[in-house]
């Protein structure tokens, strides 16, 4: 793995000669902590926009899988050039005279992988944490990072529901810590939510906003802490209602998705297809977390029931949803079977004769 990165250095140096990426001044290296579905995407998007990126995870198997996903992302970038290019990738190949393959090769050369925190934190300017959405795991993550990271490095969490104030003190640098949350399918859905906590330095917030712009994301500026941020305040309500319809036997996942996709508020992907994209383990974690927090309310009881249903009928049977985020190529089971799930077939929402 490391030898492959080293052997690509020639490509890296050659490709950078004409680069004009608008990286943030004084910010050259970024560390991604957690190489799962979103962590792997954040790492690739950051690297394709000109930053050196180190990926840290707890096992060699995890970082090897991440490296393989990055090769798949690079192939997708090249394949989409000149066609329906992702919003977050528009203009990238222009930095290489329109040579998408050169851009992809240089991106992969900018990525490194390790299970050693000291190695990952060496010389970094910003850290993006994408470990599982579990309070205890996140709390245990920051101590080793603070120990090895430069004093001036900014820490961010990619949490989708938890508040930065829950972790600010354990980071060891609360004034340099905030949330930077991305959507799954980061280059197609190129939005990023910025949320500080009361102790976040406003200059750090501005610096993170500049970084967000530089990796071709549209920043959503959140002015005070809010569980669920903007994105999940909208989407969790939809997914909770959709799950409740299935858990209570009102309708099937397919018919819930059809109804959503055919109505004015809908889109090309229904709530169950969306949950597969997120990953069902994350959906269960969110249900269980907020079900306990809101257990004295109807929605809390509903979320706990939804979590138990998904655990028994999907997770326990190895149906985890999509791992790479590409329903056309990923081999997986969730609410749908991949690749090419039924909701991608035009007949899914066609009139039956």
Image: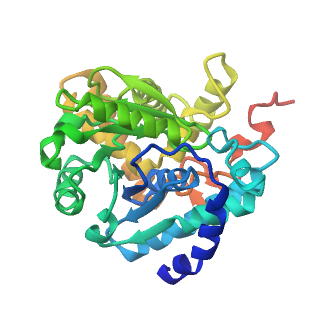
Give how far across and how far down residue 16 sits, in percent: 61, 61
- Against 264, residue 51 (above or below) is below
3 or 60: nearer the viewer: 3
Q: Nearer the viewer, residue 25 or 111?
A: 25
User: What residue appears at the point 24 percent right and 57 percent down from the top-left corner?
Assistant: 150
Q: Position of residue 76 (x, y in %)?
A: 69, 56
Horizontal arrangement in the rendering, residue 125 relative to residue 188 (left or right) = left
Q: Is residue 339 visible?
A: no
| Residue 78 visible to an observer of this rendering | yes
Quadrant assignment, res 149 = bottom left
Residue 219 vertical placement versus 155 (above, below): above
Residue in front for this viewpoint, 235 or 144: 144
Residue pictured at 25% horizontal, 34% vertical: 163
As drawn, the residue found furthest toward the front would be 17
Query: Residue at horizontal 62%, vertical 23%?
Result: 266
Front residue (pair 240, 114): 114
Q: Is residue 12 left or right of residue 233?
A: right
Residue at far right of view: 353
Q: Quadrant of the C terminus?
A: top right
């Amino acid at each position: 793995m490391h030898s492959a990165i080293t052997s690509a250095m020639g490509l890296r140096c050659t490709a950078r000669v004409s680069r004009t990426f608008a990286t943030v001044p004084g910010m050259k290296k970024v560390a991604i902590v957690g190489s799962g579905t979103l962590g792997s995407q954040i790492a690739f998007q950051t690297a394709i926009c000109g930053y050196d990126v180190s990926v840290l995870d707890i096992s060699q198997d995890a970082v090897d899988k991440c490296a393989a996903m990055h090769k798949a992302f690079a192939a997708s970038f090249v394949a989409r050039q000149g066609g329906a290019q992702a919003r977050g990738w528009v203009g990238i190949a222009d930095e290489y005279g329109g040579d998408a393959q050169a851009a992809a090769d240089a991106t992969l050369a900018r990525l490194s992988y390790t299970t050693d925190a000291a190695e990952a934190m060496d010389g970094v300017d910003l850290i993006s944490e994408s470990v599982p959405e579990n309070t205890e795991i996140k709390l245990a993550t920051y101590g080793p990072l603070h120990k090895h990271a430069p004093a001036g490095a900014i820490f961010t969490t990619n949490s989708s529901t938890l508040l930065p104030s829950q972790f600010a003190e354990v980071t060891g640098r609360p004034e340099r810590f905030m949330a930077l949350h991305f959507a799954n399918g980061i280059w197609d859905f190129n939005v990023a939510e910025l949320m500080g906590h009361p102790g976040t330095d406003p200059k750090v917030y501005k610096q993170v906003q500049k970084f967000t712009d530089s990796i071709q994301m549209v920043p959503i500026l959140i002015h005070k802490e809010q569980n669920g941020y903007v994105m999940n305040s909208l989407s969790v309500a939809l997914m909770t209602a959709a799950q409740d319809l299935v858990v209570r036997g009102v309708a099937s996942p397919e018919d819930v998705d059809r109804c959503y996709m055919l109505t004015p508020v809908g889109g090309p992907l229904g709530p169950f297809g969306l949950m597969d994209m997120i990953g069902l383990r994350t959906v269960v974690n969110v249900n269980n977390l907020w079900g306990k927090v809101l257990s004295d309310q109807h929605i809390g009881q509903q979320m706990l029931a939804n979590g138990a249903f998904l655990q028994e009928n999907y997770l326990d049977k190895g149906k985890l949803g999509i791992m790479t985020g590409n329903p056309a190529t990923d081999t997986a089971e969730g609410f749908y079977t991949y690749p090419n799930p039924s909701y991608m077939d035009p007949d899914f929402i066609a009139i039956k004769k």
